[in-house]
Image: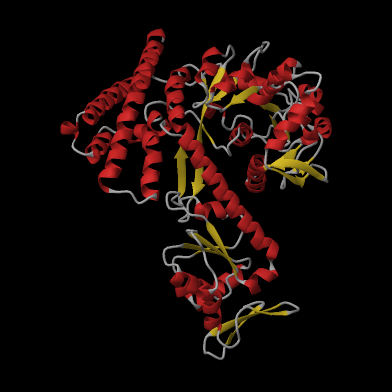
Amino acid sequence: MGQYIITDAKSGDKTLLFRNGKEVRLHSAYDPRKEAERSVSAFSKGRASIIVVSGLGLAYHVHHLRMKYPDAQIVAVERDPEAAALARQTYPEFLEGVSVITAPGKVEEIFEETDMALFRGVAHYIHRPSFGMQEDFYNGIFIDINRFFTSKISDLLTRFEFEQNWVGNILKNVHHTFGSGRAADLFGRFRGYPGIIVSAGPSLRKNFGLLAGLYDRALIVCVDTAYKVLNRRGVPAHMVMTLDAQKHSLRHFLGLKGPLPPLLADMVSFPHIARSYPGEKIFSTTSKYYTDARGEHRKESTPLMDWIERFIPPIGDIQSGGSVATSAFDLLLNLGCDPIILVGQDLAYTGREIHCSGTHHNDEWTGLYSRFVNLETINQRVVRKRKIKRVEAYGGGLVISDFVFDLYRGWFEDSARKVPVKVINATEGGARIANTGEESLSSLAARLPVRPKTPASILAGVLDKPAAADPSKLLAALGQAAEGVTTIRDMAADPAASGDAQDLLNVIEEKNLVPVFNPFLKKSSLYIARHGIDGEKAAAIIRCDIESACVRLLPLIRRCEKNVAQVMEKA
């Protein structure tokens, strides 16, 4: 039993003491059940659908929370696994249906499959005796939970806004994958090589010269925002990576001087980038891998890609935390790089600047300069519009950051803690990123060895022999999809032929087009579930969405079919 002592309370129930130099009574010595009932009666979860309990003891309070809020998801956090084991042994019925977290890193596993249609927020119940012994631990876990759901909501809103555009971009990009490189072909090819992620933070200007000297000793992957900065100074990179589906991302590639490194483009990236880029191209797709609460491994693909990859070889999955730099981090993990080195990853307004000078953002601002307005003034105006906060700085002290930077910083900190490789922050400015080592790039340059086989030669060897892929399967699938969408469109336009919305959904399933239509129906499905809409009103919403989806999908599929057919003709 270690430091815990179970004794009988006056009421006949069990009570719990903790002894470690001092004695902490975790429950009443007289009536722990009544004590928990009083405490829970004074607690209100509000609209929250999840209750996080900090501190377990023997779980009397958890039992009363379950009775008071039978429809809420209850998750108990307990710092000491021994205490959690005692609770399960003593009153196992109190923890039925309750998840228990005893260590950092389990938050995603517990909450990943939460139905966001039913999510109404998180309420925090504190078991004061347990909480008082390890406040930092419990506060840290609750911060992780809030950060997780903030990211989850942000991801959901991003998907609502962009998923339909992603589908269009994928259909416009997919024909380029035949004859181009695939990220999957690179996985494991750089095992043991250092990998450097170059981002566009203000501190990047400190390391231009040093990066050039590391070209033959480390794999250098530059995010699209930063590449124009390197290109203008003649600093080479092995790959430039782009992820954004929006048109403005094309500006990162205007006015570049050759020779250019291979472009690593996500399948959802703005199509004109891959179409116009003069260098070699490699494609990847974003997927999320996670372990659910049952311990089973799950994969969440970019919309439509699970359908596309039924007919083409795997492109190569890269996980993302929402930015190109986070995708580059997972890319380097898949490639086998060790250590991973961060450069220009300020995640803060270092010197009250937003980006390193030389990005397309700064180029556009030059037109705003006047006798009264300079770059510093423009930066200040942008910063003042953000919800800023002060965070611990690289090397100590404080630096100005904001909500979005904080999300990405949390992603890097969590990832650096979990990965089996060393992560070094060589930014030399910006926010401190926990779980990374801080070291200057000059120090790294002095000790990284010259490799007999350079990263450039490894990359060239893979790209010289791209994996063969037969477009005929995809071409046939696109033809069938176009016919199916046409049928569904005609049914939706003719109420007498289509019956109700369920008839349309049945046809979508029969023709194996659920992954194709899902991105166009997801937002309304969530709206219907969240507001309890049913009957004719729900059917009318779904029917309207299906008809609109057909109008958008059919020309996209036909255009993709034509592009793939032209690839076959040239082969």
Query: How many labels sit on residues?
Result: 0
**Vertical relation: 304 (above or below) 391:** above
Q: Is residue 481 or residue 220 the one in the foreground?
A: 481
Relative to residue 506, is residue 515 drawn left or right? right
Which x, y percent locates residue 3? 67, 77
Instruction: Looking at this view, name the residue that lies furthest to the left.
Output: 496
Relative to residue 450, is residue 103 drawn left or right? left
> Residue at coordinates 64% horizontally, 17% vertically from top-left?
261
Relative to residue 194, is residue 442 drawn left or right? right
Quarter of the image that includes the N terminus: bottom right
Q: Quadrant of residue 509?
A: top left
Which x, y percent locates residue 126? 60, 68
Which x, y percent locates residue 467? 48, 21
**Vertical relation: 81 (above or below) 473:** below
Instruction: Looking at this view, name the residue that lies furthest to the bottom.
Output: 10
**Vertical relation: 493 (above or below) 12:** above
Q: Is residue 513 visible?
A: no
Instruction: Looking at this view, name the residue that lies furthest to the front.
Output: 372
Which color mode does the image show?
secondary structure
> Residue at coordinates 54% horizontally, 51% vertically from top-left?
108
Q: Quadrant of residue 571?
A: top left
Relative to residue 419, is residue 447 drawn left or right? right
> Residue at coordinates 55% horizontally, 24% vertically from top-left?
265
Q: Is residue 548 or residue 437 the one in the foreground?
A: 548
Q: Is residue 202 visible?
A: yes
Which x, y percent locates residue 267? 49, 26
